[in-house]
Image (cartoon, coloured by chain):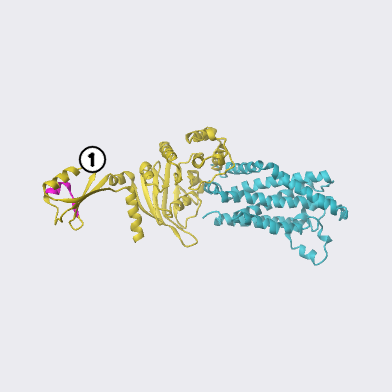
């Protein structure tokens, strides 16, 4: 796959001295869905704003579809559709007019069929003649997506697409994103919801305090996710792992007070019951059992915490 | 895409005119009624005591000043509002993220606002004809002058709209600066009628040169030579374009 966005050493320092981005390098492949995760103020929106032309970078460079976002902004912006976090619409305009306007603004010739298709895909066709102010919040969000798709972008930025959106609409949004991906559109979304990244993304990036801390394939992450850790709190300390437990590859933790066993929940045999049976056979007593799943959220939280501690 | 994003210019222009059309009735009624009131008060009440200025019937004499005054206000208001509203509602994100250059943005916004000003100026001109005979000595110069004034003040309004961070700031310059300058700039009297030192002081007011120039296109004479008026119009255009150019280069109050 060819890369569609190349970010190199991107920095942003605000006049106040606050460093929103501290040298971000990132390459986005054409056709993928990339989820950018991070807490509030991590730099997600700043990064998107710079790529789309709403904010200026202090340093570094960005290329979109091979066009530098500053020197060749037309070429770069041509390829981009942006749905910002805030619901900002021209309240008094009709839905169809505002979407048609967006297409013209991006210099594309009129194409009523395309506009109709976009509106139908977003279940807005029935509302095409309604004024935007008559629509609910969720519908306004759809109008903003329709505007972004009106000029057939190759890359779609969705900044917190499901923030403040009800469950049903969130499901619809996921479905829509899946469909868009089928058409070859590259999608970059920022989110707070780990669930959302897990559901949709091909790759996940975690950003915190202006630094990209992790970029990984979701499948690779899911492998970690698919594992559970069984902790057996022993009645009495063990000095070493008994040879009889070798086949489970367990480790001794907490000064020999605990045995930790990592198993794959997806596997046919998890090995949990046989391990416990063996412990019984060996006469090793235990006081407590505990299993825990390492979720994307855990990875995320631990990354963010490490950073805070540093 | 072509070198110039003409479709974007057309889209913004249409969008802005559509916004005007939504408020068409009030948008046109207000300047017409205001002008009529000025006409009744100044033309009727004062004109009955002061029949002529510089050989021109007073009622006719004030027509160019009235048109100018309405065009100053309307141009500033429409252009500043046009760019301030997207900033206020947040929809400016789309303009900033679109493949549209600064020049294209200005042509579209200023063009639309200037169009509306010219329509209003023309309507006031026609309304005045209902009250009094107004000769026009140089019709083409008159039209040209109106276009230049509309563009200059719309550029000024555009700057104001980018600069303003509240509705109050949007109002303050037109109300506290332009309005008094227009009243004291000879909209309703000839500078020649003033005694010293006011006459000399008045000549520091740039509006004097604009109104005088417009009056020249009607009556073939003004308070100052037409060349000076043209210099001031050109000066205003240049300064406004310079400021806007700087605003877009630096992203002043537009980009973070």
Chain at numbered mark 1: A
Q: Is residue B234 left or right of residue A1?
A: right
Asked whether residue A78 is drawn in magenta, I would say no
Farthest residue to the front: give it: A287
Residue B148 placement (x, y as % from top left): 71, 50
Helix, strand or loop at label 1? It is loop
Asked whether residue A249 is drawn in magenta, I would say yes
Which of the chains is yellow?
Answer: A
Give the extent of the magenta segment.
A244-252
Q: Is residue A104 left or right of residue B147?
A: left
Task: Report the residue at 82% width, 58% height from top.
Answer: B190
Quarter of the image for the C terminus of chain A: give it: bottom left
Residue A58 placement (x, y as % from top left): 47, 58
Does residue A43 appear in the picture of this structure? yes
Residue A293 placement (x, y as % from top left): 28, 47
Q: Quadrant of residue B195?
A: bottom right
Which of the chains is cyan?
Answer: B
Q: Quadrant of residue B16?
A: top right
Q: List the residue tagged with mark 1.
A: A267
Task: Report the residue at 80% width, 48% height from top.
Answer: B138
Task: Report the residue at 80% width, 58% height from top.
Answer: B223
Residue B50 placement (x, y as % from top left): 87, 55
Quarter of the image for the N terminus of chain A: give it: top left
- In-front residue for pair A236/A297: A236
Does residue B141 appear in the picture of this structure? no
Farthest residue to the bottom: give it: B197
Q: Is residue A123 left or right of residue B131?
A: left
- In-front residue for pair A288/B147: A288
């Amino acid at each position: 796959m060819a890369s569609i966005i190349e970010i190199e050493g991107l920095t942003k320092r605000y006049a106040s001295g606050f460093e929103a981005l501290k040298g971000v390098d990132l390459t986005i492949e054409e056709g993928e869905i990339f989820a950018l995760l991070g807490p509030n103020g991590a730099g997600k929106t700043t990064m998107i704003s710079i790529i789309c032309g709403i904010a200026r970078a202090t340093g570094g460079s960005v290329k979109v579809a091979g066009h530098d976002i500053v020197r060749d902004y037309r070429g770069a912006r041509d390829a981009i559709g942006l749905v910002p976090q805030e619901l900002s619409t021209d309240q008094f305009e009709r839905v169809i007019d505002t979407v048609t306007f967006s297409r013209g603004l991006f210099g594309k010739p009129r194409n009523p069929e395309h506009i109709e298709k976009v509106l139908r895909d977003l279940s807005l066709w029935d509302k095409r003649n309604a004024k935007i102010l008559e629509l609910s919040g969720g519908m306004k969000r759809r109008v903003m997506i329709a505007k972004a798709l009106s000029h057939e972008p190759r890359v779609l930025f969705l900044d917190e697409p499901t923030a403040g959106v009800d469950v049903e609409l969130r499901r619809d949004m996921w479905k829509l994103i899946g469909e868009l991906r089928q058409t070859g559109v590259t999608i970059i979304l920022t989110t707070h919801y780990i669930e959302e990244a897990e559901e949709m993304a091909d790759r996940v990036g975690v950003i915190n305090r202006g630094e990209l801390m992790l970029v990984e394939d979701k499948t690779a992450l899911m492998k970690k996710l698919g594992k559970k850790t069984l902790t057996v709190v022993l009645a009495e300390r063990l000095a070493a792992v008994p040879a009889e437990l070798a086949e489970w590859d367990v480790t001794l933790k907490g000064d020999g007070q605990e045995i930790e066993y990592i198993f794959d929940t997806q596997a046919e045999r998890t090995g949990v019951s046989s391990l416990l049976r063996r412990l019984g056979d060996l006469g090793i007593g235990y006081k407590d059992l505990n299993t825990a799943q390492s979720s994307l959220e855990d990875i995320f939280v631990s990354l963010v915490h490490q950073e805070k501690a540093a | 895409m072509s070198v110039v994003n003409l479709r974007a210019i057309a889209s913004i222009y249409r969008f802005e005119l559509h916004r005007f059309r939504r408020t068409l009735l009030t948008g046109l009624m207000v300047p017409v009624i205001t002008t009529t009131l000025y006409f009744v008060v100044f033309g009727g009440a004062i004109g009955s005591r002061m029949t002529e200025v510089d050989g021109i019937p007073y009622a006719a004499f004030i027509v160019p000043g009235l048109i100018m005054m309405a065009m100053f206000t309307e141009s500033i208001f429409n252009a500043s509002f046009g760019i301030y509203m997207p900033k206020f509602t947040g929809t400016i994100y789309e303009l900033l993220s679109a493949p549209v250059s600064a020049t294209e943005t200005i042509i579209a916004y200023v063009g639309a606002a200037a169009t509306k000003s010219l329509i209003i100026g023309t309507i006031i001109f026609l309304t005045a004809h209902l009250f009094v005979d107004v000769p026009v000595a140089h019709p083409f110069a008159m039209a040209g002058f109106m276009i230049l004034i509309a563009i200059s003040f719309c550029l000024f309004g555009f700057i104001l709209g980018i600069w303003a961070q509240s509705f109050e700031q949007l109002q303050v310059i037109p109300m506290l600066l332009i309005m008094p300058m227009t009243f004291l700039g000879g909209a309703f009297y000839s500078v020649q009628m003033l005694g010293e030192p006011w006459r000399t002081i008045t000549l520091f007011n740039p509006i004097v040169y604009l109104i005088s120039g417009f009056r020249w296109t009607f009556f073939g004479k003004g308070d100052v030579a037409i060349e000076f008026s043209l210099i001031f119009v050109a000066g205003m255009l240049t300064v406004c374009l310079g400021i806007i150019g700087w605003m877009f280069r630096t992203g002043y109050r537009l980009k973070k």
